[in-house]
Amino acid sequence: MARLVMKFGGTSVADIDRIRNVARHVKREVDAGHEVAVVVSAMSGVTDQLLKLCETAAQKRHLLELREYDAVVATGEEVTAGLLAIALADLDINARSWQGWQLPIVTSGVHGSARILDVNGDELIRRFKERKEVAVVAGFQGVHKETGRVTTLGRGGSDTSAVAIAAAIRADRCDIYTDVDGVYTTDPRVVPRARRLDKVAFEEMLELASLGAKVLQVRSVELGMVHNVRIFVRSSFDAPETIDPHGNPPGTLICDEGEIMEQQTVTGIAFSRDEAQISVRQVQDKPGVAAAIFGPLAEANINVDMIVQNVSADGKTTDLTFTVPATDYQRSLDTIAKAKAAIGYSRLDGATDVAKISVIGIGMRSHAGVAAEAFRALAERSINIRAITTSEIKFSLLIDAAFTELAVRTLHSLYNLDSATA
Ligand code: ADP
Ligand code: ASP
Ligand code: MG
């Protein structure tokens, strides 16, 4: 007997037929004698609809109250949890739905992107033991400890709910069921030749997720790493009855580096089109200028990512380029413009038609020249690189958005990631 968390994302619960299909997946594990907590997302498209309703209701957009936004968008998951509990009852499985505050899942008070601080899994465990009851928990939501108000965990947050609950109930495994059968070398919807990976190290998954691979929310990987939760990404579309609950289903295990026998230099490629580039022209090349630029951006809660500053040729002025999330582009320009007197620059340039391509692999730690190969391959395709950043196990390149797919495919082939069969 094992204790499992099974998480189902939006497309896996998109309509009643799919919710019934999910119920059959759950039944398979229950019949195999396992204790099960299920975590569900809102039905596909529902969170977006709720979000739009909030934006329409708040005609003065800047006055949109985030506590009420959370109260509205959290309901999507509550509906799915109730519907799945009903579908499970139809299969004669003892189940009940749980909202975040009922466990409780305690979070910070940052509405819209709260962090989980604590999950109480005692009641779930007691009910496994005493009633053989399946818990169906609404993902994506929690409750702020001090105010008692409903919070949400940021887009894709049900993954994080699932891993947090797995840690709290000391589950043997956290299965993330989604619309692909694992983590691939890159988004399989963009590169059909992408290959499924059997195992990915936590560190690599952290980079893949934070650099654009939306298959897992970044926070879920962080939590998995800290609490040593075995996360297994697999498909909800495989027919439930064909799967042997004691077998080895197709999927990807996120695990410690030490568990991976054969380490490739490059594991995967992530990309993001949600970037914007800002260049501050002819700033003084003197101490304090970077602080004058990035201080106000930090105060405005804007996440700056890539930063490139040239050494000035004349010892006087230089250009400074950085990227911000595309959604913060205008706010960033306004913030810099407001601080113009303190910074001192001649012109502000920007672009939103840019994309960040990132190449990730633990093997890069011990291999030199991996990035240089990419520069050469992209040059051969006449793809211009606007900015570069590197770290121990990854490098990122900023390019024109129009070349995103070409660049990803070029690098995917370059690092021998293409599957032999597709
Ligand atoms: P869910 O609704 O189940 O949470 P998501 O849409 O959040 O699912 O995540 C699954 C999607 O992530 C896939 O459909 C796929 O297009 C995308 N994706 C991006 N990068 C990868 C990758 N490297 N491996 C697998 N899927 C990826
Ligand atoms: N429903 C939320 C979203 O669409 C959370 C999730 O699906 O994980 O972002
Ligand atoms: Mg998701």
Image (cartoon, rainbow, N blue to C red):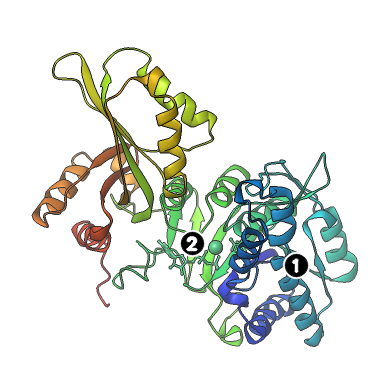
Badge 1 amino acid = Glu
Q: Specify whether 400 is left or right of 174.
A: left
Percent across and percent down for residue 299 are 54, 29
**Secondary structure of the residue carrying numbered label 2:** loop
The residue positioned 62% from the left and 54% from the top of the image is 160
Out of 142 and 412, give the one closest to the viewer. 142
Percent across and percent down for residue 126 are 87, 60
Out of 48 and 5, give the one closest to the viewer. 48
Work out which residue is located at the far right of the displayed protein and give it.
Answer: 130
Whole-angstrom CA distance, mark 2 to mark 1, is 22 Å
Q: Cβ of disc 1 within 8 Å of ligand 2?
A: no
Badge 2 amino acid = Val
Can the viewer see residue 328 in this picture?
yes
**Secondary structure of the residue carrying numbered label 1:** helix
Tell me if mark 1 has few (under 14), some (14-19) or many (20+) residues whose alpha carbon lies within 10 angstroms of its own.
many
Q: Which residue is mark 1?
A: 78
Q: Specify whether 115 is left or right of 340.
A: right
Residue 59 tag number: none
Can the viewer see residue 2 in this picture?
no
Work out which residue is located at the far left of the displayed protein and give it.
Answer: 380
Q: Which residue is mark 2?
A: 215
Q: Specify whether 56 is left or right of 102.
A: left
Q: Cβ of disc 2 within 8 Å of ligand 1?
A: yes
Taking 175 as reference, is 354 above or below it? above
Specify the quadrant of the image occupied by residue 242: bottom right
Taking 367 as reference, is 418 above or below it? below
Q: Quadrant of the C terminus?
A: bottom left
Q: Indicate which disc, 2 or 1, sits on the residue closer to the N terminus.
A: 1
